[in-house]
Amino acid sequence: REQRYRSTIVGPHRDEVKLSLNHKPASEYASEGQKRTLAISLKMAQADYLTGVHGSPPILLIDDVMGELDAGRRAGLMPMIQRTGQALGQIFMTCTEENWPDELNRSTHRWQIDTGTIARLK
């Protein structure tokens, strides 16, 4: 049946996860920053769980999250990303130059993609 529909029918992507914030549905009452923070928290928890189950860390892909968070949420996220990177292995994170977090400059390898060319930044 899955081949006929060209889609998986059973799996976690089919689950309906309902999150609440202060006992109200987050989908209706949370700000965009709060929703993004909830999503990031779930992904970090999932990575931690998978590391425990499989004994090796997953590779995390984080796409331009800094532009979607206010300064307070960014400040809270950065230590979590740093701890996760140290404990779990590799994190690939995209963001624009103006959104690059200063906290990551010390321990990261930065690359720039410009018109199809990849160059390592110092």
Image (cartoon, helix red, strand yellow):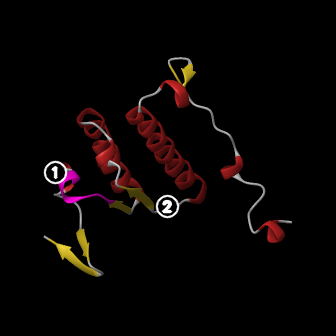
Q: Which residues are magenta?
A: 94-100
Number of the label disc, if any, that sits on residue 58: 2
Number of the label disc, if any, that sits on residue 102: 1
Which SS class for mark 1?
helix
Whole-percent x, y for residue 105 in the image: 17, 57
Identify the residue at horizontal 54%, vertical 31% (top origin).
27
Whole-percent x, y for residue 49 in the image: 55, 48
Quadrant holding the C terminus? bottom left
Number of the label disc, if any, that sits on residue 69: none
Judged from this view, the residue extending furthest toward the top is 23
Whole-percent x, y for residue 30 in the image: 46, 27
Mark with earlier residue (1, 2) = 2
- 28 or 104: which is nearer to us? 28
- 101 or 57: which is nearer to us? 101
Left-right relation of 26 to 7:
left
Left-right relation of 117 to 121:
right
